[in-house]
Image (cartoon, rainbow, N blue to C red):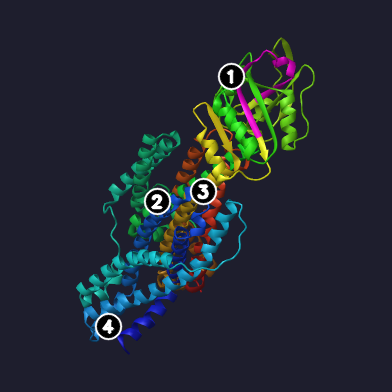
Amino acid sequence: MTLFKLSFRNACRQAGDYLVYFVTVVMVTALMYAFNGLIFSEEIRALSRLLKSMPVVIVFASIVVVGIMSWLVSYTTKFILTRRSRELGTYILVGLENRQVARLFFLENLVVGGFAFVLGILSGNILFQVLRAVILALFDIPYHFMYSFSVQAAGLTFIYFLLIYSIAQLKGRRRIRSMKIYDLIYFERQNEKAVIEKSGRRKAVFVVSVLLGAIGAVLLMAGGLLFGILGAVCIILFLYGFFAGFSSAIPAWFEKHGERKYRGQNLLVFRTLSAKIAEMGVVMATIALLFTATLISEGSGLTIQRMLQNRMALLACFDIIISTGNPEAEEFTDSVAYVKENIPVADFRQYSLYEGETSEITDYLENHTEYYRCYEKDILMCASDYAALREMLGYPAAEPGQGQYVIHCQPYLAGFLEDWENPVRSGGHTLVPAGVRTEPFAQYLWDVNGQGFLLVVPDEALQSGTVSHTMFVAKTAEPVKEAQYDFLGKQMDLDLFLFVKSKEEAEAASMMAIMVFPLYYLALVLTMTAATILTLRQLSEKNRYRQQFILLRKLGMERREMVKALKTQFVIYYTMPVVPSVLIGVCFILNFGSGVEPGTLSGSSHPLVIAGITLGLFFLVYVVYVLLSYGSLKREAAD
């Protein structure tokens, strides 16, 4: 048999034995090609000028992915070399030279990588269509299937793939060429050394790491750049210290609770588990760190996505908004005239908003809610203007009656104002509350229909009122063109506020494509990488589990008890790196979401809901690897 045939046969066997690793490499290659396809797509770049910066962001994300995948491939290559060292040593024993065996091992991995690359490119074409459809949907453009193969995207993906594989394979080849027959044959029996050799030190490190973890979580929740950096450092030290000291912490705990040591399968489960963690403490800590980065990346992406969508919903009830504190300013009058003359307007309204005589409601909200104060006094609107705007927006009539006022506010403030009963004085009139309305009404940002709320009062109560600012709003028959927006933008000065729905929607869609997509990209790669290493370690011990259960069966343990012990150990093994990651990730998401302006993330977009969705998406991927590993171990080890 020639060296090439032997390499090909071993490569096929390797792909079958390490199917989880092979599939992960294929999927990551597909992701890289799909996102590289966005870089070279003229259709995508033409959607918005902001998308011109998307290639930089995607390349940066891909560099991070290359680093992560390089670690995965290097770790897996070393792992495969360890498991097959006896076989490779036998090749030398029967007459092959070290350099030939090294070449054989290199060719095997080259064949596996080549197959993974080809399958990844083919799968990436399908995934690119999915990304293309989503981006077109963000810009409200109909999707039509159009198959295309990007040579540039494939070439860039190949460069990334070459970087990922070359480092790992050259390192493995160099190791084989320098090893002796004895070293190769007995290489598999060498255990990974514990990071901290002495048990006493491991216990101390474990206790200190737990304290650092608590301090890190508090610092992350406190907010601020400095606290965030210090918190991140504490969290990293916590993860590595926790897993480095775990193998001593568990025996120490059982020494103090001796009655639990022999309860059920505890001794078998935790003895095996602590030995495994002692061997792979650094790897387990790195996996926990990757899971933490996954949740942070995914949670940040989801928070930014909801923030952009909700910001648009708060303002996008009107197609055009022009606002100023000086309605006589030339910029304002010229802009309004331009809109009326050059843009097909279906309906419009120009009106003023007024300062109230007091700031009673503003003070109440500032003291009892997460409310950002923008005006010194409460903002009031004439009932006639309110009625006209509601009719323009298609809302049912809800004007105040004689001697009454209506509160129109963002939904997150409604719960605090529904029971408001205090009267309001305006223009010599005393008005009583007549209900709360919460439809979208352009109450986000500044110089709009009130910062979060306004009071609608009868017109006669504002005849001598002080104008706060004047607004021009319009509904258009068709979206405003980019050239028209550019003309309006040139008229703007510091005293003028301009909002154009079509322009803002395009910018929001561009920001989601630039920021959110790469974050999801990173999160998915991080999850698959960490879960792959965990699964490889578990599946590689099938023979050891089988021998262990054969011995236990001879000692009288029932199969049901063995399966229960396996399940318990399995759950703990896969849960350990996830628990600290979930705690840290949820703290970060809640802190990040709380930094967004009030009212933007509420209801189904509340940070708690975002944290729940993030965990759901993470476990959706993670559980696939867990079930695959458990099914294989239960079938081969316990039967």
Q: Which of marks 3 and 1 is nearer the N terminus?
A: 1
Residue where numbered disc 4 is placed: 91
Q: What residue is at 48 percent from the left and 73 percent from the top?
A: 636
User: Which comes sooner in the sequence, label 4 or label 3?
Assistant: 4
Marks 2/4: CA distance?
Answer: 39 Å
* Observer-nearest of 13 and 66: 66
* Mark 2 to mark 3 CA distance (whole Å): 30 Å
Q: What residue type is labelled 2?
A: Leu
Asked whether, in this view, residue 553 is left or right of residue 9, the answer is: right
**As rendered, which of 169 and 59 lies closer to the eye?**
59
Residue 460 forms part of the magenta stretch: yes
Overall secondary structure of the magenta stretch?
strand
Cα separation, mark 1 vs mark 4, equals 83 Å
Residue 504 placement (x, y as % from top left): 56, 42
Closest to the observer, 235 or 123: 123
- In the image, is residue 80 above or below residue 406? below
Q: N-terminal of the two: label 1 or label 4?
A: 4
Magenta run includes residue 421: no
Provide residue 13's location: percent of width, then percent of height: 41, 79
Residue 25 falls left or right of residue 502 = left
Disc 3 residue type (three-letter): Ser
Mark before the other along the chain sequence, 2 or 3:
2
- Residue that badge 1 annotates: 363
Report the mark closest to the observer, 4 or 3: 3
**Res 26 quadrant in image:** bottom left
Element assignment for label 1? helix
**Image disc number at residue 510:** 3
Q: Is residue 562 visible?
A: no
Q: Give the range drawn in magenta.
A: 454-473
Circles 1 and 4 in contact, beta carbons < 8 Å: no
